[in-house]
Amino acid sequence: MEHSVPTDTELIERIGKSDNEALETLVSRYEGRVYNLAYRMLGNRDDAEDVLQDTFFNVIRSLGKFQSRSSFSTWLYRVATNAALTKLRQRSRRDKSESEFLDEANSVQQMAHAGIKLTDWSESPSEKLLNNEARQVMDEAIAELPEMYRVVFVLRDVEGLPAAEVAEVLGLSVAAVKSRLHRARLYLRNRLSAYFTGDKA
Amino acid sequence: MDCREIFEGLSEYIDDELAEKTCEEIKRHLEGCENCRVVVNTLRRTVTLYHSIEPESIPGDVSLRLHATIRLEKERDES
């Protein structure tokens, strides 16, 4: 007998017939990706585990309603994203307001416009760019993004989904995804610039 | 194209998602504008730095607990 790897659709069919082994296989296939997404969105292990559990509970509960119009992984990302956003909203910590965030994201444009000379740190040695302290600054900077910018950035630049799939996961237009992604990246660039060069962008 | 227009398209520029003509216009602008060049270089570097972060792997105990709760839930469903 040939042992080919079952597709998601085949596994879902078997799960519908109460095949628990198929369920285990499907969960094992995606738990890592969901955990990473949750961890990047929430920034700590405990919350990431809660989101992971919530995601798969919701998936199992509504698997019967899943229609293969979109791919299973796109649908799973949607469920996971919603679970992560719900968790994020339960936390009392106040997010940066959107206007505050946009001002900071756009500040580099103002600086450039005012003729202030910007510093290029892109060729700095990797010991400087990739050490632990720099990593911590990168994590903190993600955590400062307002949720709808953070989720776009994490799906696109951390999980590596194409812009069109991010749009499908979030129910946004591709243009809206690209625009949010751009603001998020500018904000992160400015934060890293401030750290690497001391510039107040 | 002035700096303001260039700025809006820079993420698409570094992702290689722009039409060839717009791409050429941006390239031409960059040759003469040092600040925009710095923004492109550092924006691209920012993205590659984030790409270089290793995925946070799921801790073994977290995975075990997930599978255990799912099994428990299934058994409860079936009984």
Image: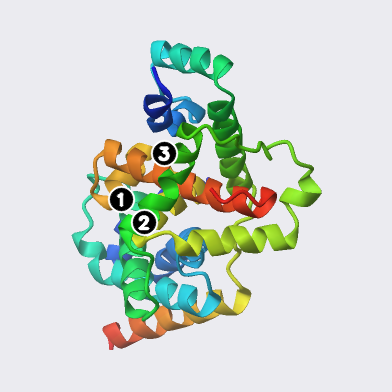
Query: For this rendering, which residue is in front, A161 or A63?
Result: A161
Question: From what the image shows, is residue A176 above or below residue A52?
Answer: above
Left or right, residue A82 beside residue A142: left
Estimate the spatial distance between the alpha carbons at disc 3 and disc 1, rounded to whole Å: 11 Å
Which of the numbered marks, if any, corresponds to residue A14?
none
* Residue picked out by circle 1: A169
Mark 3 near mark 2, Cβ–Cβ under 8 Å? no
Estimate the spatial distance between the alpha carbons at disc 3 and disc 2, rounded to whole Å: 13 Å
Give me the residue at 75% from left, 57% from top. A131
Residue A106 x/y as whole percent? 41, 44
Label 3 SS: loop
Which of the numbered marks, if any, corresponds to residue A77?
2
Question: From what the image shows, is residue B21 above or below residue A95?
Answer: above
Mark 3 near mark 1, Cβ–Cβ under 8 Å? no
Q: Of marks 3 and 1, which one's residue comes earlier in the chain? A: 3
Q: Amino acid at mark 1?
A: Val
Q: Amino acid at mark 2?
A: Tyr
Query: For this rendering, which residue is in front, A76 or B79?
Result: A76
Mark 1 near mark 2, Cβ–Cβ under 8 Å? yes
Which chain's residue wears label 3? Answer: A
Asked if both marks, 3 and 2, belong to the same chain, the answer given is: yes
Label 2 SS: helix
Which of the numbered marks, if any, corresponds to residue A162?
3
Residue A110 x/y as whole percent? 44, 39
Q: Of marks 3 and 2, which one's residue comes earlier in the chain? A: 2
